[in-house]
Amino acid sequence: MGTHTDTDSTHPQDPLPTPVTAAGRDGLAAVLAHPEKSVIALDFDGTLAPIVADPEQARAHPDAVPALAALAPKVAAVAVVTGRPAGVAVRYGGFADVPGLEHLVVLGHYGAERWDAADGRISAPAPHPGVAAVRAELPGFLDRTGARQGIWIEEKGRAVAVHTRRAADPQAAFEALREPLAGLAARHGLVVEPGRLVLELRPPGVDKGVALLEYVRDVSAGAVVYAGDDLGDLPAFAAVDKLRSDGVPGLLVCSGSDEVTELRERADVVVDGPAGVVRLLRALADQLG
């Protein structure tokens, strides 16, 4: 089980945490030994950006971009893997035109979209038709279930998310909507991905694990670090486990929260939210000189 290893120390004395598993220690050692072969991959919301009640107000931690820019030139690649549209993550993260992040990649919509800092372009296939159908049906559907009050619908382009964080009883609303939304999604060929007080309706066969595996293999990485905070990051954790079994060392980092415990149990290192992720990134950059 992961344990908190974060401290309140300030830069430039941020310590590198000691992973609580042998596999994690091997992963960190591989990154330190061969940074030029290592990929650093991170979720956005809850990992680089604090969770907020209104998803449109989410922004990267103020020290996240400087930490990434310090680390990126010392490793093979840095990627942000998010359920958000790639362009939205780039804007909310402030990732464009940053010295040091010229080769940053943002894999948006769980890898269905890709933004490359090198040219500022987004590449993506055509959207799943079920998303538009669900988008049109969802407001009336929520009204009929009597669950509309305090529910926030987030338009994500290639997916639609239903947030319960603003409801009178957020967890009860979340649980009450899981089964009905799963049925709605299934009728339109979609699946429901649960998260931290959010239920996302999106196409099947697309997740952070698939995106991470494809990217790591595409750049022929020799080691990988993945940091996440939510249920949607579990497939990426599983992908790192798969890479480990294939001989590619990896380090699993949980951006800790009290809302989701599954990642904490699976992680090699647990840090204290986005501020802890920033400290870890800075410590890595410092250690790599």
Image (tube, helix red, strand yellow):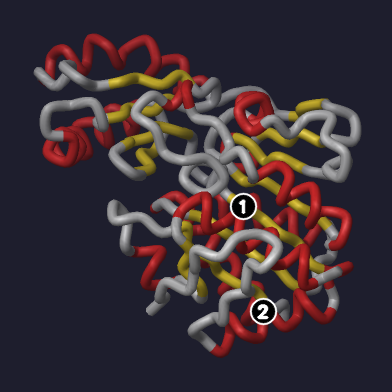
Residue 149: x and y in percent read 16, 16
Q: Amino acid at mark 2?
A: Gly
Relative to 178, say whether 220 is above or below.
below
Q: Amino acid at mark 1?
A: Leu
Residue 35: x and y in percent read 83, 70
Q: Residue at x 18, y 26 (%)?
A: 167
Instruction: Tally the numbered discs.
Output: 2
Residue 74: x and y in percent read 86, 61
Per the image, the residue denoted by label 1 is: 42
The label shown at residue 3 is: none
Q: Residue at x 76, y 52 (%)?
A: 78
| Residue 139 appears in the figure | yes
Relative to 171, say whether 137 is above or below.
above
Near mark 1 (Cα within 10 A), the count class, few <14, some 14-19 or many ≥20, is: many
Q: Quadrant of residue 114?
A: top right
- Gap in angstroms between the C-alphas marked 1 and 2: 16 Å
In-front residue for pair 121/158: 121
Label 1 secondary element = strand
Q: Residue at x 53, y 40 (%)?
A: 49
Instruction: Specify the farthest residue to the bottom.
Output: 22
Left or right: 219, with 237 as reference point: right
Near mark 2 (Cα within 10 A), the count class, few <14, some 14-19 or many ≥20, is: many
Per the image, the residue denoted by label 2 is: 27
Q: Quadrant of the C terminus?
A: bottom right
Left or right: 180, with 90 as reference point: left
Q: Quadrant of residue 121?
A: top right
| Residue 213 appears in the figure | no
- Of labels 1 and 2, earlier in sequence is 2
Label 2 secondary element = helix
In-front residue for pair 232/192: 232
Left or right: 46, with 222 as reference point: left
